Image: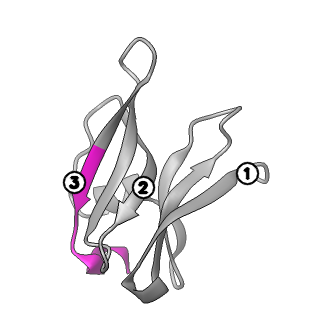
Amino acid sequence: MPSDRTYINAIAADGGLLFGTSGDNFFGIMQAIVWTKDGGARLLANVCAEQGVVIPEGYVLNGVLAASRDGSIVLGTALDLDSPFGAQVSFVLELPASAYF
């Protein structure tokens, strides 16, 4: 949406991978993203699904805080929508760097 904000928090693969969060915090939930030159911005959850990684029901990946040099390891936050107040939890994701390209 035009009102969505994007924040990049991690750069990997010599600038070929940008990780962060995007969305409108007032009208929805921020979601973790990855950007590549050829693929543009994509939801990190969609990349996970394409790679066969199952995100537990009720969780939304909502931000990336750091990434390894090649992007194969990503540290971020997720929301537990099933908790009473949408508790924020941490996650570590390990995918081959080629998964993003």
Q: Earlier in the sequence, mark 2 or mark 3?
A: 3
Q: Badge 1 is on which residue?
A: 1
| Residue under the point 31% across and 41% down | 90
Quick check: 67 left or right of 39? left
Q: Badge 2 is on which residue?
A: 65
Tell me if mark 3 has few (under 14), some (14-19) or many (20+) residues whose alpha carbon lies within 10 angstroms of its own: some
Q: Secondary structure at mark 1?
A: loop
Label drawn at residue 50? none
Residue 51 x, y percent position in the rendering: 24, 64
Do the numbered discs 1 and 3 sit on residues whose CB atoms are within 8 Å?
A: no
Q: Earlier in the sequence, mark 1 or mark 2?
A: 1
Q: Nearer the viewer, mark 2 or mark 3?
A: 2
Label drawn at residue 53? 3
Q: Is residue 35 magenta?
A: no
- Chain part drawn in magenta: 91-101
The quadrant of the rendering that contains the C terminus is: bottom left
| Residue under the point 42% across and 88% down | 14
Depicted 3 relative to depicted 101: above or below? above
Inter-mark Cα distance, 1 to 3: 27 Å
Q: Nearer the viewer, mark 1 or mark 2?
A: 2
Q: Secondary structure at mark 2?
A: strand
Do the numbered discs 2 and 3 sit on residues whose CB atoms are within 8 Å?
A: no
Residue 29 x, y percent position in the rendering: 57, 36
